[in-house]
Image (cartoon, rainbow, N blue to C red):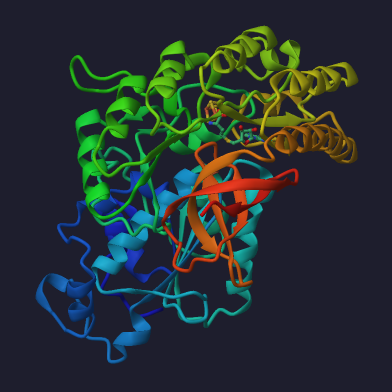
Amino acid sequence: MPPSFDVRLDDLTGARAESREAAQDSDSILAGPPSELGVNKSPTRHSPAKAARRAGSQHHGDGAWSTHPVLGDERTFYIETFGCQMNVHDSEKVAGVLLGRGYQQVETVDAAKLVFYNTCSIREKAAQKVFSRLGEFRKHPDHGKVIGVLGCVAQQEGLAQLEAGNRRVTGLDTDTDETFETEMTRRDNPFRAYLTIIEGCDKSCSYCVVPYTRGPERSRSSASVLEEVRKLAGAGYSEIQLLGQTVNSYRDPAPRGKTFAELLVTVAAVPGIRRVRFTTSHPRDFGRDIVEAIDSVPALCDHVHLPVQSGSTRVLRAMQRTYTREEYLEKIALIRSARRPISVTSDIIVGFPGETEQDVAETLSLLDAAQYDGVFAFQYSPRPNTASLQMGDSIPEEEKGRRLAIVQDRQREIQVARNNELVGQTFEVLVDGASRRPGQWTGRSSSNRILNFSSPHSDLLGQYIQVRATGASPNSLVGEQII
Ligand code: SAH
Ligand code: SF4
Ligand code: F3S
């Protein structure tokens, strides 16, 4: 049995009271998405200075702090995150709680006493990753670490499977209404702050686990969103990314609350905020008011991620996506009618059960019509509990791979052509990385394009600068700073 720890795992996992004993002497803890887990419930605020003081102290009141002789090693954690941006943000919240309790984040499993995996269940391969990680621990039963499995796999299917490995499992408290409070979030990107404004999903796409792993839609009040944005601006963040699986289905719970478009405009008006992004938008709830907001407020980024999934109305119907090919293309036309160009990106699934050659051809022609600036394409993967599970998995993996390559090739051609047209144009870039080669930097435009550029200046990180594009490749532009 591993030693007990001064951080109460149930504070992190939201474990129910009756599960606490199990939580404390098990070597693997399972829980749902950390955003569901009441990580906010602790009264401790994250303060690095306080955390450092605590790390050296031994406090015995109500079991909050332990008497471990080797405090340094015992109070370390490692967290690995899979899946979407919302999972990345959830991991930031978990890290924030632990840092606030004097724990130190380390870069390797070996150096850590507490090891967390924040998992994704969207496709089978994603889900398998956590099982292969846990398999490594089983090979070394005396590893002496506490392993925590958070996120969508834990929620979806992990409980039974991991229990079989003689591990105890905690319960899950999903009925917190304080899901969104993020006072102790440790943010990984120093310039872009993520902020979840709507949790869960009420759509029922037939292939998708998210409604099962993340539960129904719950929106955070606009007042609370704005309060956090002001704090983030005060802390020096200039770019905010609003998150939600269907971010534009946002419904302000306050009486006479803001629409999503109104929320965008208000967030963009917070002093200090220079860029506001949002992802992911669902085509059904994507209206003219969002385009008008982007048109009238320069701080709203000129980029919309609007996944289509398929160009065939027949397949869209089987996917229960709630729109036809034509209705989707009308949304694209709406975006293209904006006064300033808006970059559009998408997700595509190939190999959905029953997808024909004709359906694939329609997806290819939709790529031509939509003129996306980026596409994430995936091979269909049957997932537990989903409606499409009943439809079988009729397209062989090899054929799915062939279709994926065709879609990616066509999209690459489109991006090469589109990016070449941008050569010579000037972009405002938020610099977020330095290359190992001196004088070389990388950053993103408002439209979320990556620009790799040269500059004679040093210390550009976090700055907004003007860059002229001098060359193009399918996924990025190269350029030089305009001095
Ligand atoms: N909420 C977003 C996307 C969520 S998941 C939306 O509605 O668009 C991200 C992407 O994973 C999806 O857009 C879809 O393209 C892909 N995806 C989801 N379930 C999948 C599955 N079972 N097999 C393959 N790809 C899947
Ligand atoms: Fe999944 Fe569909 Fe919800 Fe997106 S909208 S999270 S694809 S169910
Ligand atoms: Fe995100 Fe994967 Fe869960 S995409 S919501 S972490 S299933």
Query: How far across and down, in percent of the image, does residue 154 sit?
Result: 49, 50
Using residue 119 as the reference point, say whether residue 395 is left or right of it.
Answer: right
Q: Residue furthest bottom?
A: 69
Give the residue at x 61% y 17%. Answer: 321
Which residue is at the front of the view, 345 or 102? 345
Give the residue at x 46% y 62%. Answer: 460
Query: How far across and down, in percent of the image, does residue 18 sit?
Result: 27, 54
Query: How far across and down, in percent of the image, does residue 304 sit?
Result: 53, 29
Quadrant in which residue 112 is drawn: bottom left
Judge whether residue 160 can be spotted in this image: no
Give the residue at x 19% y 76%. Answer: 65
Image quarter where the N terminus lies is bottom left
Quadrant in which residue 278 is drawn: top left
- Ligand 1 picture quarter: top right
Judge whether residue 194 can be spotted in this image: yes
Q: Quick check: 91 above or below 327?
A: below
Query: How far across and down, in percent of the image, does residue 183 sit?
Result: 23, 52
Which residue is at the front of the view, 317 or 172? 317
Q: Quick check: 430 above or below 354?
A: below
Q: Quick check: 376 above or below 353?
A: below
Q: Residue furthest left?
A: 61
Which residue is at the front of the view, 22 or 351? 351
Give the residue at x 52% y 14%. Answer: 284
Quadrant in which residue 418 is drawn: top right
